[in-house]
Image (cartoon, rainbow, N blue to C red):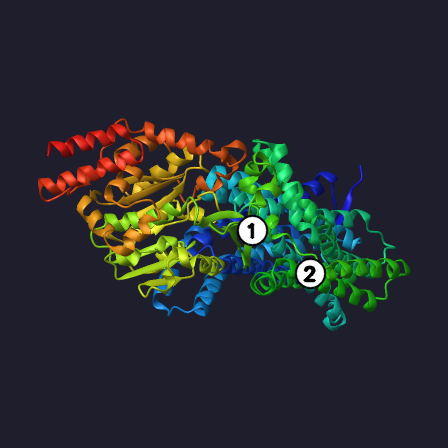
Amino acid sequence: MRRFSLSLGSYPMDLSPGQKRLIYTLFALSGCVALVYEVLWTKYLILTFGATIEVVSLVTATFMAGLAGGSLLLGRYADRNRRLLLVYALLEGGIALFALTFPQALDLVEAVYIRSRQALPDHPGLTTLLHLTLAALLLLPPAVCMGGTLPIMCRFFVKRRLSGEIGKLYALNTLGATLGAFGAGYLLIPYFGLSLTGYLGVAVNGLIALLAWQLARKICRRAEGVALPPAPETPLQPLTGFAFLLVSVMLIGAYGLAYEILWTRVLLLFLGNTSYAFATMLSAYLVGIALGGAIYARRIRRTTNIPALFALLTVGMGASVALTVPFYDRLAHVFLAAHDLAGEHWWFLTLGYFLIAFAVMCVPTLLSGSLLPAAVAMLAPGPEQTGRGVGLIVLHNTLGAVLGSLLAGFVLIPQLGIQNSFRLLAALNILSGLALFVRFRACRAGRLAVPALALAGFSAVALPAAWNPAWMNSGIYCYAEKYLEMGGLEKVLSEERIIDVIEGTDTTVAVHESLDGQMRFFTVNGKTDGGTGRDMGTQLLVSHLPMLLHPQPRRALVIGLGTGISLRGLSAHPTEAIDCVEISPEVVKASAYFAEANGRVLDDPKVRLLVEDGRNLLLTERQSYDVIVSEPSNPWQTGNANLFTLDFYRLAARRLAADGIFCQWLGLYDITTENLRIACRTFLQVFPHALVYTSGSDLILVGSRQPLVMDYQRLAQRLAVPAIGAALTLAQVESPGELVAGHFLFTEEALRTFSAGTVLNTDDRSILEYSARHNIGKNTLGRFQRENMQALKSAAEKIFLPLDNLGANRTAVALALRDLAGGYAKVGRKQEAEHFMKMAEEL
């Protein structure tokens, strides 16, 4: 049997093939658990700090900085230590310990965060510094341990073939990370929740540490009696001699992560803003990186001209991006075909999504995955200094990745747009490769391949072709069935035009208009989020209903600006101040296109617009409100999902006055009946008194901790106010009778019957966030809406109208009853109309 020799200390020890395979497996599992933690901890911190792109970027940057620091520090240590497998076991055990205590540490950090936000002045710079400091306290210790595992393992294994072995280890660890990203997004968190997923990660980490420790002790026992000479202290060659290489490695890291940010922004338009989409894109990216490392490890030879290969790979990375970017708008047709082939089979569609995402990223990521082990080979630290060499390369590559991701998200996209950002980065990437080509005097073969690739890439960059904005913002992920049923993508899109596209750090907002100019709407990452069409009534009712029901709504909070139509007429209620919090600056810009429809409401002195995360505002502000309205209506979207959990409702309840009212908008067209029951039961758990209304394809839940009734005379008085009456006329409501007859469904008793026996939607187990898998095929063409309405109506055998104060005398009561009769007659409910008319006549 062939055996493998390595050094544990400076004495030779043999590892059997089985032992070597075990260590490789443990290292792959380590990468898997690390990605599970990264996804998990990011979700936790979003709940604490907010779901803004700034928070996500800072959390990611902090995590990666920890990886970089750990790689450098422990890489240096690896070259001086002789019991590396024991060190590796201790690192894995340390990660498990930090992960086990993370929830308790997060509770402390959240308490400090809330107190600090309340004590510090409201300044963006201070808030960012606070986010960074607290994220560092939580993430740096485990990230440093994770970052140290690669140089430790490289030093453990490497004896002769430096870059090949490093390529293999890098590939294995990244392949494990791929499984972790996919498993966390598709299986672990959806089915087990955050807490249990964390504990599973701790268990796996503990098992890795235990097995590595046992194997290390076994090797040590076999080595007893062998003299251990001191570790060599030969230093690395002076850093100045490798400055150009290290800068190049940093730039490659920057290009790679910047491309990932840009690919994410493109693919979100076709995959949707869901947790599944992020898991798919991250998995596809990591598969490419892993395959690149594996191919490099298998194909590299001692005779290979590494500098020439490094230059060629760098130029190829930029050229491959430049050559494919002009065709990204055609992805709309590719994704539509995937939906057509998959039908209503979710896992087939997931496979299609993954393959398309991988096809987009594969060539650049394959080349990128080969560049890191190639860089280590060029540094040539030698077996005795492998740890320091790998640490230096990983440090510069990771720091570049951090800078690249921040540059792409916060500078390039807002200033240049996505397509031009790709062009600029690809051009700089190619130039970097050409600089390497000149600096390292590549071989004769490279003298042909490198310039040819560079010329092709620069030619693609120079092409003036622009993406088709209609295809890019077509929202295939939620409208595919509509396109297939109505004659195809081109036919449907030909009935509207796009008047503006606003590309921001994490959102693309497009403003659409019908060809006759009569209807206008906007989309966020391809999905319609508001307009002057059929859902205009819901936009008005969701904000006015709680205001009408509250006797004195002095302060109100509206979460979500949208078109701004929901705010129209609100200040005419007896209010002193109205806060509106909107997470997306791009939506704020788009609202200007609806100034006529919203009555230029942002100019109202009572209205204060806050651009931040609405949930985080409630967490950190001391202000209480009489009315809180939550407009986001799709709980399957990332970010929005945090506004439909038990924890969020409890948070909102703490910010409501004793008689305060909370209002929630829920779409009936993209949620299963079972998930609708979950949403309603969760709502009732915090707001036990509720009135339920419908508006078109939407459900409006109005809840309170105090009993709710509809005061007829108050409704009539408020509707008589010109601004309020004018706003609700747009929702086809001109009297209390029309409001009740046209929109009231039932009270909490029926809602409790409807939602009985189901589970709760919580931050820890956010069931609704992972319900996007149901929104495919015919389900999106009205099936859910019909099933939900039928289930809701069947929950109430007899409707009780919680009407109060019909009038002070018989005449007033009779007029109110006639109004109700007219309202029911208007909506075609003849029996109810006759009933109320008879009561009026009897008076």
Q: Residue furthest left?
A: 809
**Residue shown at 54%/33% (left/top)?**
777
Give how far across and how far down residue 129 sits, in percent. Answer: 47, 67
> As drawn, is 23 to the left or to the right of 449?
left
| Disc sitting over residue 62 in the figure | none
- The Cα atoms of the two marked residues, 2 and 1, are separated by 26 Å
Location of the N terminus by quadrant is top right
Between 147 and 642, the one lying in front of the other is 642
Give how far across and how far down residue 25 sits, in percent. Answer: 66, 42
> As drawn, is 530 to the left or to the right of 734?
right
Question: Which secondary structure lies at badge 1?
Answer: strand
Q: Nearer the viewer, mark 2 or mark 1?
A: 1
Residue 414: name its quadrant: bottom right
**Quick check: can you spot residue 382?**
no
Residue 758: name its quadrant: top left
Between 298 and 403, the one lying in front of the other is 403
Amino acid carrying label 1: it is Arg
Give how far across and how far down residue 334 sits, in percent. Answer: 66, 41
Amino acid carrying label 2: it is Arg
**Residue shown at 62%/62% (left/top)?**
404
Residue at label 1?
Answer: 497
Relative to 31, does residue 317 appear above or below in the rendering? below
Label 2 close to label 1 by CB (< 8 Å): no
Number of residues whose C-alpha sits closer than 10 Å to that of mark 1, classed few (under 14), some (14–19) or many (20 or more): some
Q: Residue furthest front?
A: 516
Number of residues whose C-alpha sits closer than 10 Å to that of mark 2, classed few (under 14), some (14–19) or many (20 or more): many
Between 518 and 697, the one lying in front of the other is 518
Residue at label 2?
Answer: 423
Give how far across and how far down residue 55 sits, in percent. Answer: 49, 59
Q: Earlier in the sequence, mark 2 or mark 1?
A: 2
